[in-house]
Image (cartoon, rainbow, N blue to C red):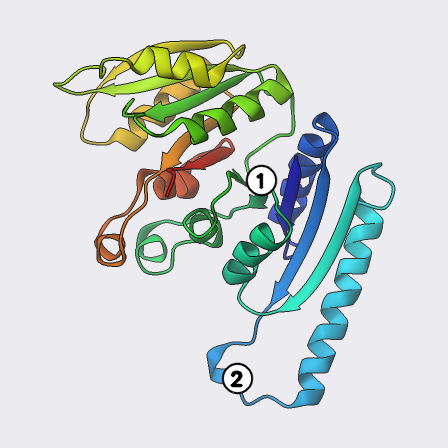
Amino acid sequence: MRVLLPTDFSENAALATQFALDVARRTNGYILALHAYDVPHYERSMTTSLLIEMKKVAEQNMADFEQENLTNSGIKYDSHVMLGNPIRLSREMVHKHNLDLVVMGSKGASGLEELLIGSNAASVIHNVDVPVLVVPPSSVVKEIKRIVLATDLEFKNKKPPLQALAKFARAYGAEVFLLHIQDEDGIPGGTRELIAEAMGDVKHTYHIASQKEDIEATILDFCEEKETDIVSAISKRYGFFQGLFHKSLTSKLAYHSRIPLLALHEPK
């Protein structure tokens, strides 16, 4: 897989780097490391000399990062240091370089921070069209054996995210648990056939959970019970005004999951 690795050189980003390297090794892949440094709005009038110094520091940090993590990894890679918003630049790099996956660290968020600010990871999820692997601080790089896909099983015209999940699972030889949050309507007709076609040779099983008020907690409790290594969800697409008032399940999992989240996307 061709992996975008946004990094701010933090401890969280260092952990995400280990996951990115693991994915690249298993798929004979490639890593594009990106460091985006931005100027706060209230400091837009800073001098050219200060901007030059910021660029110099950022480039030195990237050189150190490469030497420590990539140079002797045996993985093909490139690196970019760019001035600008990291969310926008991540989206642009995914399109420009035809990348398959974004791997990034997350500090999570809670309370007022989650409501008003969110996180870079959640913002990237909703601004790129490829899967995003979000790595929380509590994660451990290890063999991935079990992946939970939390879903309403409404997969009409949604084979691409299932195929992306299958591709990721296949790289690890992992089993996929499809967790359906049961509602009054049950499983839509034809769903199992569609899933079987998309998943191919990837082992997958179906599990039912009763619909509760806190769906996020239901999913994370199931992951803990089954000792799964990754939780996955399909990020729904909302219009601008819907997005202002709707906090997606995928974002909530990005904020609160203690295991990596593989965020998939509805087709456009």
Residue positioned 61% across, 14% down in the render:
173
Q: Which residue is mark 1?
A: 101
Q: Which residue is mark 2?
A: 43
Amino acid, disc 1: Leu
Mark 1: few, some, or many residues within 10 Å (few <14, many ≥20)?
many
Residue positioned 36% across, 57% down in the render:
113
Q: In the image, residue 50 lies at what x, y percent? A: 68, 84
Image quadrant in which the N terminus is located: top right
Residue positioned 71% across, 26% down in the render:
26
Q: In the image, residue 20 lies at what x, y percent? A: 66, 38
Q: How far is disc 1 from disc 2 in space, using C-alphas?
A: 33 Å
Q: In the image, residue 220 lies at what x, y percent? A: 37, 26
Image quadrant in which the C terminus is located: top left
Above-or-below relation of 87 to 232: below
Identify the element where label 1 is drawn. strand
Amino acid, disc 2: Glu
Answer yes or no: do the residues labelled 1 and 2 have beta carbons within 8 Å? no
Identify the element where label 2 is drawn. helix
Above-or-below relation of 196 to 250: above
Task: Report whether 23 appears left or right of 132.
Answer: right
Q: Nearer the viewer, mark 1 or mark 2?
A: 1
